[in-house]
Amino acid sequence: MSQKQTNPEAAVHPIISGRWSPRAFDENRLIDSTKLAACLEAARWSSSCFGEEPWRFIVADKSNNPDGWQKLLEALVEGNRVWAKNAPVLILACASQAFAHNANPNRWAQYDTGQAMMALSLQAVDEGLISHPMGGFSSEAAQQAFAIPDDFALMSVTALGYQGKAASLPEHYSAIEMGERKRKPLSEIAFTSWNTSWQADEKS
Ligand SMILES: Cc1cc2nc3c(=O)[nH]c(=O)nc-3n(C[C@H](O)[C@H](O)[C@H](O)COP(=O)(O)O)c2cc1C
């Protein structure tokens, strides 16, 4: 697990600090289906508005579903395909846009699906895997390839696998891969009222 958190302001659990989005995947290491099941299970146990569980996942595992994997890879934009081609598993996350109990629009479905994918990514860290979410894909191509109904929003494709060598990436990407990982300071994102920074109690 690489630790690339560069400006921490508080201690967090190692699976949180250990998660990042590498592009260098080891193309020779496949994912054991027990580990993949654990990642999907983590997503399954996410919270969701009204307990709707609006997420659906297309799991494209190169080792047992090469056609599905190839279709999902082809749906990616070129800039993602160049490195995601080495990931043994690609997962398409979809969100049901309407509540099952009353057919009203579910404006939290995408939030819930994002949470589920974060749970998956954190479980991946615990399994010794890396993950990289992508919004850069053709929704139309993926929808057609997997016959996904129109009432689902196609949110992301996540590459899952084992860490490879940064040097194996095209130069532009290897520089990013080895670069610093930064975040806005807490004072810019956590407020007590709008634009008034929340501050940790000095005694704690
Ligand atoms: C919804 C979403 C879409 C993203 N789309 C892409 C993408 O198309 N290509 C890519 O290389 N990274 C993509 N990323 C990864 C982000 O660039 C990355 O998460 C961000 O730079 C923070 O880095 P970290 O994940 O290492 O903390 C996406 C992330 C999310 C959550």
Image (cartoon, helix red, strand yellow):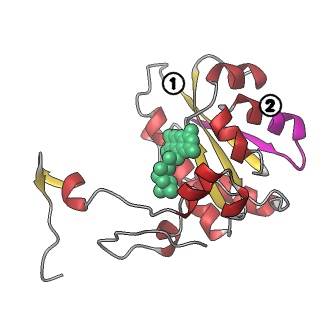
Mark positioned earlier in the residue sequence (2 or 1): 2
Q: Disc 2 on helix, strand or loop?
A: helix
Q: Is mark 2 within 8 Å of ligand 1?
A: no
Which quadrant of the structure image shows residue 53? top right
Front residue of 62 and 98? 62
Residue 71 disc label: 2
Which quadrant of the structure image shows residue 100? top right
State the quadrant of the C terminus: bottom left
Q: Is residue 142 above or below residue 3?
A: above
Residue type beneath disc 1: Gln
Q: Is residue 92 above or below residue 179?
A: above
Q: Is residue 56 above or below residue 139?
A: below
Q: Is mark 1 within 8 Å of ligand 1?
A: no
Q: Does 58 appear in magenta?
A: yes
x and y percentages locating residue 178 in the rendered image: 55, 64
Left or right, 165 with respect to 67, comes to left
Residue 97 disc label: 1
x and y percentages locating residue 88 in the rendered image: 79, 51
- Image point (66%, 19%), residue name: 140
Front residue of 185 and 92? 185
Residue 58 in sight here: yes
Span colored in magenta: 55-70
Closer to viewer: mark 2 or mark 1: 2
State the quadrant of the N terminus: bottom right
Q: Is residue 92 above or below residue 128?
A: above
- Image point (40%, 28%), residue name: 107
Left or right, 115 with respect to 137, comes to left
Q: Disc 1 on helix, strand or loop?
A: loop
x and y percentages locating residue 162 in the rendered image: 73, 63
- Image point (56%, 48%), residue name: 117
Residue type beneath disc 2: Lys
